[in-house]
Amino acid sequence: MTKKPKELHPLNNRSWLQAFFKNFNGKPPKLVGKAAITGVLSKPATKRKVTIRINEILAKASEIKIGVMGDTLVRMDSNDYRKGFEFVERVYKSKSKEKIIEYEVELIKKFKAKKDKKVTNISTKRAWRLTTYNGFYFIYVVYNI
């Protein structure tokens, strides 16, 4: 795990002017929901809890996207989420970058196999660029109601 120092966090190094213009692209999704689930992925109970949480989100959402991130603020600050989604919920957290990347692919395939039109993920390729400032990586769901 490579943890970056908080002093290098992009939001801390943004000028007032950069922040002002960034908001023309829309607001980032609002972080909502319960605390992220933790646990060993080799235990079926952990995966079952994650599946239940995603199904709860699917029940209330008009569309969702499942992803993986190292830092919530940086990921939700990107332009693709500023315009497209209202809410983000972190559903699982781990300190293992490799395991969480594999699990994200597994979850996308699982929920796309259900042929649910609400799941808007296009690719099931592994994430390759994750940065963490606190040592944790997250599986998240962004969604609209």
Image (cartoon, rainbow, N blue to C red):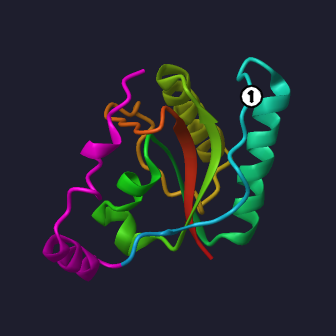
The residue positioned 53% from the left and 25% from the top of the image is: 102
101, 17: nearer the viewer:
17
Query: Is residue 2 positioned above or below 89 on the image?
Result: above
Check the image and report above or below for 75 versus 58.
above
Image side of residue 46 versus residue 54, left or right: right
* Residue situated in front as seen by the camera: 144 or 132: 132
Which residue: 80% across, 20% down? Answer: 43
Q: Which of 14 and 42 is in front in this view?
A: 14
| 109 over 53 or under it: above or below | above
Q: Is residue 15 magenta?
A: yes
Q: Which amino acid does label 1 sit on?
A: Gly
Between residue 91 and residue 20, name the one nearer to us.
20
> In the image, 39: left or right of 12?
right
The N terminus - image quarter: top left
Horizontal side, residue 134 vs residue 52: left or right? left
Q: For the point 44% across and 40% down, which residue is it? A: 70
Image quarter of the C terminus? bottom right
Residue denoted by label 1: 39
Q: Residue at x 68, y 46 (%)?
A: 36
Up the image or down, 23 lies above or below 122; here it is below
In the image, residue 7 lies in the stretch drawn in magenta: yes
Residue 40: image x %, image y %?
Answer: 73, 22
* Other-residue count near label 1 (Cα within 10 Å), few / some / many at <14 / 14–19 / ≥20: few
In magenta, the rendered stretch is 1-26
Residue 54 on image: x %, y %: 71, 51
